[in-house]
Amino acid sequence: MAVELEKMYAQLIPSYKIKLHTKSCFDKQINWIHTVEEIEFVEFLHGNELLFNSGLNYTSDEWLREFIDALCAKHAGGLIFGMKDGTEFPQRIIDYCNEKKFPLFSASWDTPYIDIMRLFSEILLKNEQIETNLVNALKNAIYYPNSQDMYRNHMERNGFFEDYPYIIIRISCHAYDTEKGNETLKKLEHNIRFSLKKTILYREQGVLTVLSAGHFENWVKSEVQEMCERDKNIYAGIGITVYKLADIHRSFESAQIAYQLTKTAVPKNYLVYNELGVYKLLTDLKEPVLYTKFADEVLGDLLRYDRENNTEYVDILRAYFENECSTLCTAKALYCHKNTLTYKLNAIKEILGYDILNNENRTKIMLAFYILRIGEKWYNHYSE
């Protein structure tokens, strides 16, 4: 849970003598606050903290720059530094913080730090409660869409209104799972909060669910695609855009389908449901058992023959269709003689008991291969 530093600072200005010296707060997200006086104690920070320092150890500009370097190395969210009346930061220190995109504040020595820390703590705790409630509301919208009293009022009170475009994204990077958790997934969550300003996020079983509100699909797609292109171990599925709170569950379901297909049928780590083509039909989960039955009716005899005789006729037929049913192109792809391929294709026709080049049968075979690519386990997962 985090609060934008800019919002926290805006609440301080009316009551306390705190001044921002950098160009901005650089969209920093603050998870907690600490007092740190000595550089040696910086190593115990976790990241995204706002630090208070009394300034008593400020003996030189070199010391302050070293202190700032240590904070940046731990990804701290900003520094409020105590200054004697009339004392100012050197411009080179301010320029350095701007270069590092590190927010630097000053406070007079008579500023009541305890009161400020208490105020920040209250803001953080209040925000944490709001986010917890929003996550629960989102889960209710996904799993109990007809019970609108369980989510509508709370979401609208916090700026998630009926006429916004809503898109669900499902993201994981299990390659980085460790006994201590997944730091990469935590970093992704932080980056998404930074990129997509109006969001609700939660993690379950190593998968991050993101509700993006007010952003249009093309913009969300470009953000997620860039993220997945930078790291091929990140897998993401983007759902459809909906414009009603009661339809958020539809975006979640389509995002889950796209995400699951990255793990099964489609060799890509990033998929958009609206771009799935025939898979949109084949992943309609109202009657998932129908698809596996259809594949068995079309190719079942050939699958069983391969298992019993240790042949590879299914792979040959798949290659034949992937090469537009061209015997010459398929023979080249399989590195076999054209006559050998013709013999095997005749054997396949005999086993299946129908003409594989008949228009209707060609359509059935292609659909069956799509279903096989998705996998029986995938369908079974949703039929249980």
Image (cartoon, rainbow, N blue to C red):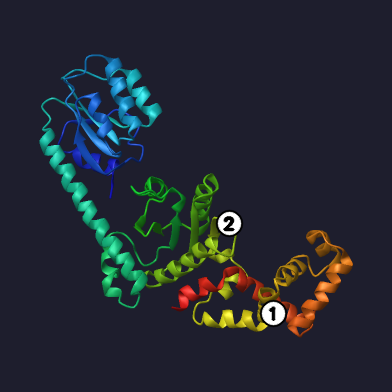
- Nearer to me, 249 or 219: 249
- Image location of residue 294, percent across then percent down: 62, 82
Q: Residues within 10 Å of mark 1 (few under 14, many from 20)?
A: some
Residue shown at the point (53%, 44%) measured from the top left: 230
| Residue that sits furthest to the right in the current view | 339
- Image location of residue 265, percent across then percent down: 58, 65
Residue shown at the point (53%, 82%) measured from the top left: 289
The image shows residue 14, relative to residue 38, as above or below, that is below
Numbered tag placed on residue 74 in the rendering: none
**Quadrant location, the C terminus:** bottom left
Residue under label 1:
364
Residue type (three-letter) at the residue carrying disc 1: Lys
Label 2 sits on a secondary structure element that is loop
Label 1 sits on a secondary structure element that is helix
Numbered tag placed on residue 268 in the rendering: 2
Q: Looking at the image, tell me whether mark 2 or mark 1 is earlier in sequence order.
A: 2
Q: Residues within 10 Å of mark 2 (few under 14, many from 20)?
A: some
The image shows residue 83, relative to residue 217, as above or below, that is above
Q: Is residue 173 visible?
A: no
Residue type (three-letter) at the residue carrying disc 2: Lys
- Image location of residue 354, percent across then percent down: 77, 85
Q: Quadrant of residue 242?
A: bottom left
Residue shown at the point (34%, 70%) measured from the top left: 141
- Nearer to me, 27 or 186: 186
2 with respect to 333 (left or right): left
Q: CA distance from mark 2 to mark 1?
A: 25 Å
